[in-house]
Image (cartoon, rainbow, N blue to C red):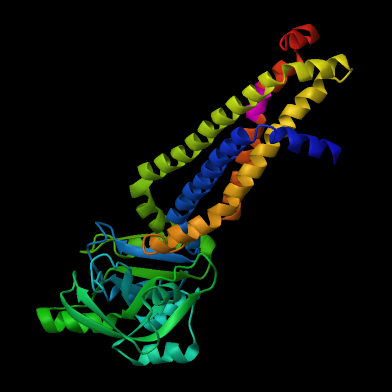
């Protein structure tokens, strides 16, 4: 306890300098945590994806649809547990900036494959019965103030026209990684509208979701599905849901690398600032350390004093930075909820922040601590004169 009080007193001997250093640490550590959370949010869809599902799409591009009759052929493939399908809708709610995910799906088969979407049974049945109905995620409903029975009006972009949907259910995620900012409605309604407007066959889907009996056989089942439609007019590409999500993340790989690089550069900068603070501190106390050595204190004890002081400053400033990361992330995630449906500070991020505090405190004091432990008594005492 005596050593701790000594370190605390030494740390705040020059209050302004210590306060400014801590402010820098708070900014650096909280910024580091926020940037790491952005990277985690970018990969949230990948982390939340199931290993027991495949996504089957056109081998050419996602913009090329697949025939609806593929569903029955995929269903009988060995290793397949269930099949559903979806079309990206891309409607606009009031204004362009109100973007959120909208899928036209086959409700019974789709929800059976996505148990992470928790929905009241009565609401689920109401959704199944109402062709004009839809379900939305809890966070999406909170964002726009929607409730059961409300009508959502969307302006179609890919599928022109004014579309109106009645909210029949509000689902919740089974855990924090589940996307609660989606809207799902009946694929049959979309198909009927296309058929009525364009007067052509509308039995095409964007992608198939394939449930697996055994997640360990994902590669084999994917090959069987693709082999089934090889040399057809609409060849397929089947991959795990995680690989499908990663294909989107990889498009912004350069951005992610830049964000991660910036997060580490911030730590290096505050490490230099901290090292300057500790060097100035050590230089001002040359006479004190020389006196301690003259009184018989070991060089190692002097080094530990400087190291302990540096770690104390780093941990106090860094601790405040870690605490601030949570409200900052909440505010940031709330404003960009559409882009980052899952935006939470993970335990790993907090661990990295604490580790960064320890590294900054340790490295910053390493050089001055070594120098002070080797100072000559006469040289140190003459520094006063």
What span is colored magenta in the figure?
Answer: 363-367
Between 279 and 14, the one nearer to me in the picture: 14
Residue 181 location, quadrant:
bottom left
* Residue 146: x %, y % from top left: 37, 81
Q: Quadrant of the N terminus?
A: top right
Q: Residue 109 in the image: x percent, y percent?
A: 40, 80
Q: Is residue 303 above or below residue 78?
A: above
Q: Please name the predominant secondary structure of the magenta segment in the image.
A: helix
Front position in the image: 294 or 332:
294
Quadrant location of the C terminus? top right
- Asked if one can make out residue 21 in the rendered structure from this viewpoint, the answer is yes
For the residue pair 171 and 86, the one nearer the viewer reads as: 171
Residue 220 visible in image: no
Q: Is residue 180 above or below residue 222?
A: below
Looking at the image, the residue that sits furthest to the front is 385
Q: How many numbered discs? A: 0
Nearer to us in this view, 292 or 29: 292
Quick check: is 232 in the magenta stretch? no
Q: Residue furthest right?
A: 296
Q: Is residue 148 above or below residue 202?
A: below
Decide if residue 353 is on the left or right side of residue 287. left
Residue 74 in the image, given as x and y percentages of width and height? 36, 72
Q: Position of residue 335 (x, y in %)?
A: 39, 62
């Amino acid at each position: 306890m005596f050593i701790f009080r000594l370190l605390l007193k030494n740390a705040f001997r020059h209050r302004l300098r210590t306060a400014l250093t801590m402010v820098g640490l708070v900014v650096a550590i909280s910024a580091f945590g926020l940037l790491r959370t952005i990277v985690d949010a970018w990969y949230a869809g990948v982390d939340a994806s199931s290993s027991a599902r495949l996504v089957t799409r056109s081998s050419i591009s996602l913009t090329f649809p697949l025939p609806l009759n593929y569903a029955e052929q995929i269903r009988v493939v060995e290793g397949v547990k269930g099949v559903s399908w979806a079309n990206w809708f891309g409607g606009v709610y009031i204004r362009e900036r109100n973007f959120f995910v909208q899928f036209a799906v086959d409700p019974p088969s789709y929800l059976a494959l996505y148990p992470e979407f928790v929905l009241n049974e009565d609401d689920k049945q109401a959704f199944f019965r109402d062709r004009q109905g839809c379900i939305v995620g809890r966070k999406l409903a909170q964002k726009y103030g929607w409730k059961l029975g409300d009508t959502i009006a969307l302006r179609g972009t890919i599928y022109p026209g004014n579309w109106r949907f009645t909210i029949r259910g509000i689902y919740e995620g089974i855990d924090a990684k589940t996307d609660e900012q989606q809207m799902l409605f009946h694929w049959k309604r979309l198909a009927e509208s296309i058929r009525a407007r364009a007067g052509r066959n509308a039995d095409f889907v964007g992608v198939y979701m394939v449930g697996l009996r055994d997640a360990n056989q994902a590669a084999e089942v994917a090959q069987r599905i693709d082999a089934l439609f090889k040399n057809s007019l609409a060849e397929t590409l089947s991959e795990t849901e995680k690989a499908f999500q990663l294909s989107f993340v990889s498009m912004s790989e350069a951005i992610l690398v830049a964000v991660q690089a910036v997060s580490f550069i911030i730590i290096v900068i505050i490490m230099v600032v901290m090292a300057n603070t500790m060097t100035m501190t050590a230089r001002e106390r040359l006479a004190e350390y020389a006196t301690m050595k003259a009184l018989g204190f070991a060089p190692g004890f002097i080094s530990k004093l400087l190291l302990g002081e540096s770690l104390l400053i780093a941990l106090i400033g860094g601790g405040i930075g870690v605490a601030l990361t949570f409200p900052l992330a909440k505010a940031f995630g709330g404003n960009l909820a559409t882009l980052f449906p899952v935006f939470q500070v993970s335990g790993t991020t907090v661990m990295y922040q604490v580790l960064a505090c320890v590294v900054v405190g340790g490295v910053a004091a390493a050089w001055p601590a070594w120098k002070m432990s080797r100072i000559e008594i006469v040289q140190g005492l003459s520094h006063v004169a």
